Image (tube, grey):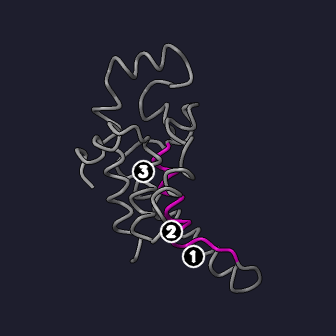
Amino acid sequence: MLKEEVLEEFDKGYDCCQVVFHYWAKKLGLDEKTAYKVSTGFGAGMLQGETCGAIIGAYMALGLKYGYYKTGKEGEEQKVASIIKNIQFRQMFLETYPSTMCKELLNADFATPEGAKKIREEQKMVTFCPQLVADIINILERIIEI
């Protein structure tokens, strides 16, 4: 997915987590409505500047593909495989970006009026976030086996 395509999704009103998760959920067979609904509320680091919503969307996509639900030996093996994919994603992300925290990535905190104002004034949602989302989707392209 390209930065311009991410911007189109933002223009429709979707946030970073929704864009990442929807993109992968669709490829993995989850319906669009469910994908958008379940990924609601995680953008802007859960509106608190915490873990970047796009990263949360990536972990959700990895869980959809590699997550476990069984118990016992089979569940344990799948759990380990899932953890390995999550670690691989995080390492690849940190090769390009210095942090997984929204407020650190944006150098401002959405949770404060001053931070939200700075993010708007610097147009981070147009200049920075779309590229970050596109990069995350592309990292997942290298990890998720379809």
Closer-to-camera residue (78/60)? 60
Tag 3 secondary structure: helix
Closer-to-camera residue (37/120)? 37
Q: Where is residue 86 drawn, in percent x and y?
A: 53, 63
Q: CA distance from mark 3 to mark 2?
A: 14 Å
Inspect the image, locate mark 2, and give the three-letter code of the amino acid beneath it: Lys
Q: Are marks 2 and 1 in contact (CB under 8 Å)?
A: yes
**Residue occupied by mark 1:** 81
Q: Are marks 1 and 3 in contact (CB under 8 Å)?
A: no
Within 10 Å of disc 1 (Cα), the crowding (few <14, some 14-19, many 20+) is some
Q: Are marks 3 and 2 in contact (CB under 8 Å)?
A: no
Q: CA distance from mark 1 to mark 3?
A: 20 Å
Q: Main secondary structure of the magenta part?
A: helix
**Residue occupied by mark 2:** 85
Q: Is residue 32 magenta?
A: no
Q: Residue furthest bottom?
A: 73
In the rendered image, which quarter is residue 128 located in? top left
Q: Where is residue 48 drawn, in percent x and y?
A: 58, 31
Relative to 103, does residue 28 appear above or below in the rendering? below
Q: Is residue 9 left or right of residue 76?
A: left
Q: Is residue 67 left or right of residue 2?
A: right
Tag 2 secondary structure: helix
Q: Which mark is residue 94?
A: 3
Q: Is residue 61 magenta?
A: yes
N-term mark: 3 or 2: 2
